[in-house]
Amino acid sequence: MPGKTLFQKIADREIPADIVYEDELCLCFRDINPGAPTHLLLVPRKPIPRIALAEDDDQALLGHMMTRIAGIAQKEGVSENGFRVVINNGPHGGEAVPHLHIHLLGGRQMQWPPG
Ligand code: 5GP
């Protein structure tokens, strides 16, 4: 059986993190190396490695996570000016941690296209 992912260890309080939201399906905590004044990671408790490996059975979980974003952004004070939501997938996508996570970035003007 494979070991826990980094984000499972955060969920299980084995590694400290600044958790701003959690429920039975997911949790959200501050990125350790923020790329914006507000930089959060929204993570399913289930260790889906990346969005490309999500399955039909994960529809409700992914929908749940997507519908948590507005409330988290509101609580963080980035709703009014806007924010960006990003999922990195695989090497070209810039994925570093193989446990699905949604980046929520805000607090400054974002550029497009991303680097
Ligand atoms: P990725 O590049 O895989 O899309 O994003 C992984 C993110 O996890 C990066 O933004 C990185 O800063 C963040 N990260 C890596 N290790 C830790 C950690 O131990 N704690 C927290 N809070 N964030 C981490």
Image (cartoon, rainbow, N blue to C red):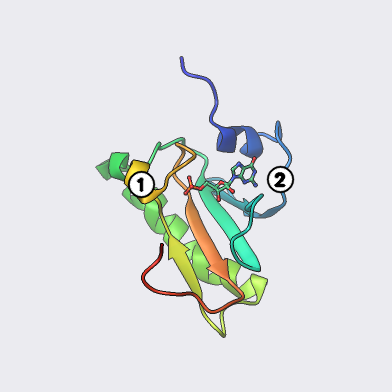
Q: Which residue is mark 1?
A: 89
Q: Amino acid at mark 1?
A: Asn
User: Residue 21 placed where, x, y %?
Assistant: 64, 56
Rendered view: 74 above or below 28: below
Q: Secondary structure at mark 1?
A: loop
List x then y, in percent, for residue 59: 32, 50
Q: Which badge, 1 or 2, is on the more N-terminal residue?
A: 2
Q: Which mark is residue 75?
A: none
Q: Nearer the viewer, residue 87 or 22?
A: 87
Residue occupying image coordinates x 65% and y 71%: 75
**Going 63% across and 39% down the picture, which residue do you hit?**
11
The residue furthest bottom is 80
- Quarter of the image holding residue 113? bottom left
In the displayed structure, 95 sits above or below 74; it is: above
The percent coordinates of residue 20 (x first, y second) are 68, 57
Q: Amino acid at mark 2?
A: Ala
Please state, as top left, top right, bottom left or bottom right, where the C terminus lies in the image.
Answer: bottom left
Label 1 or label 2, whichever lies nearer to me, is 1
Question: Any atom of ligand 1 within 8 Å of the CB at mark 2?
Answer: yes
Q: Residue furthest left?
A: 56
Picture residue at 53% right of the left edge, 20% below the top: 3
Residue beneath disc 2: 17
Q: Is residue 46 above or below residue 37?
A: above
Using residue 7 as the reference point, say whether residue 91 is left or right of it: left
Q: Residues within 10 Å of mark 1 (few under 14, many from 20)?
A: some
Residue at the location (56% across, 84% down)? Answer: 81
Label 1 residue near ligand 1, CB within 8 Å: no
